Amino acid sequence: MKRAIDESYGTKGENIVKMNYAAVDRGGEYVEVEIPKEWNNATGRFVHANYKRLAPEWIRNVADIVNSLRWKFSSCQRIRREMVDGTIPSGTAALKKRGIAVTVPEAAT
């Protein structure tokens, strides 16, 4: 590893090489973290509890599929049926707020 560091970072200066050496030396230091069993089913996608009630059908069937970038042939067919002329229904921009914070944290002084 250290030979590779010399080859990759040797021209960047002695300080950079020393920092990389220190990182390699500390590589064996780790802490094992216990992962809860319920995380096995985590999808990584947040769905609001009132999603089905709040989001119009067009958002669920077209916009969410396009925005998620998880296209399949069957979803492409459904999108083609919904967006025949390429128009988007009015008022859908209000539902496109993804993960926006309700409050802005103040900087610590």
Image (spheres, rainbow, N blue to C red):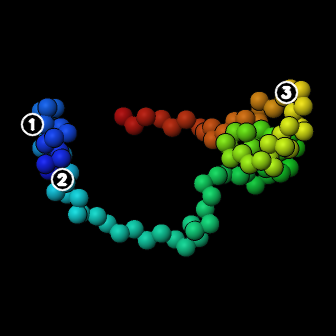
Label 2 neighbour load within 10 Å: few <14, some 14-19, many 20+: few
Distance in Å between CA atoms under marks 1 and 3: 58 Å
Q: Position of residue 108 (x, y in %)?
A: 39, 37
Of pointers 1 and 2, the one earlier in the residue sequence: 2
Task: Decide if residue 69 is on the left or right side of residue 91.
Answer: left
Q: Which residue is pictured at 90% across the width and 39% down the height? A: 81
Residue furthest to the front in view is 73
- Name the residue tied to disc 3: 86
Structural distance between the alpha carbons of marks 2 and 3:
54 Å
Q: Earlier in the sequence, mark 1 or mark 3?
A: 1
Residue at 67 percent of width and 42 percent of height: 69
* Residue type at the position of mark 3: Gly
Q: Which mark is residue 107?
A: none
Kind of residue indicated by mark 1: Glu
Q: Tell me the residue that label 2 is attached to.
A: 1
Q: Is residue 13 left or right of residue 36?
A: left
Residue at point 84%, 43% (across, down): 77
Mark 1 secondary-structure assignment: helix
- Determine whether the residue tagged by mark 3 lies in a helix, strand or loop: loop
Kind of residue sitting beneath label 2:
Met
Helix, strand or loop at label 2? It is loop
The reply to whether dot 2 and dot 3 touch (C-beta < 8 Å) is no
Q: Nearer the viewer, residue 92 or 6?
A: 6
Which residue lies under the disc numbered 1? 14
Residue 59 appears in the figure: no
Q: Is residue 90 above or below residue 106?
A: above
Q: Nearer the viewer, residue 58 or 9?
A: 9
Q: Quadrant of the C terminus?
A: top left
In the image, residue 9 lies at what x, y percent?
A: 18, 37
Counting from the top left corner in percent of width and height, residue 83 is at 87, 33
State the residue lying farthest toward the left: 14
